[in-house]
Image (cartoon, helix red, strand yellow):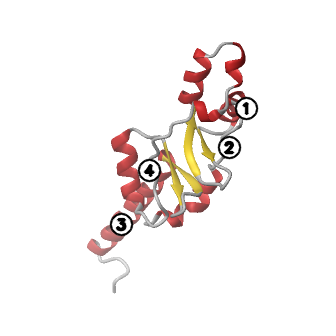
Amino acid sequence: MLIEKFLPTAHKRMCCIGTDAALLQAARLLERDHDMLLVCDTDDRMIGVLTKTDAVRQIGICTGASCTAPVIEAMTRDLITVAPTDQLKEAWEMMKTRGLKNIPVVDPAGKPLGVLNARDVLQCLWNEVQQEEDLLFNYVMNVGYR
């Protein structure tokens, strides 16, 4: 299955924030509904991600005015992304190998399209396996082939 078929679900998990947004504002977003924020430049291209771990790390060392630092100072710049034309199984293998809970989906221009969540991906792959198992069982039992 291609990731593009999973985009409606991935799009719902996406939350973008500008590079100049305050870290405390980002922390509030992370606290409520999101595990990851996509940090985008003025052209809406993704240049980094901010996770709860990134925010806690930066807030833990801040004092005074540095607590109002922009997210660009705390974000992860080394991006691991997937494209809509990639296979969902390959994305899962990448997530599993690197220990990622979420992975951004971007278009060829680097603009974010959504965020794949490991639980959603695994559920989808499990459903595929279940369907294949049902078809194989029916074939072996000669059900529906008369």
> Can you give x and y, in whole percent of width and height, for residue 146 in the image?
34, 86
Q: Distance between the residues labelled 2 and 4?
A: 27 Å
Tell me: 80 left or right of 56: left
Tell me which numbered mark, 4 or 1, is placed earlier along the sequence: 1
Q: How far apart are marks 3 and 2 (CA)?
A: 40 Å
Say if mark 1 contacts mark 2, CB within 8 Å. Answer: yes
Tell me which numbered mark, 3 or 2, is placed earlier along the sequence: 2
The correct choice, above or below, for 55 with respect to 13 in the image is above
- Mark 2 Cα within 10 Å, few/some/many (few <14, many 20+)? many
Q: What element carries label 1?
A: helix
Q: Nearer the viewer, mark 4 or mark 1?
A: 1
> Can you give x and y, in whole percent of width and height, for residue 108 in the image?
51, 64
Tell me: 136 left or right of 54: left
Q: Name the residue under label 1.
A: 25
Quarter occupied by residue 37:
top right
Q: Is mark 2 on a helix, strand or loop?
A: strand
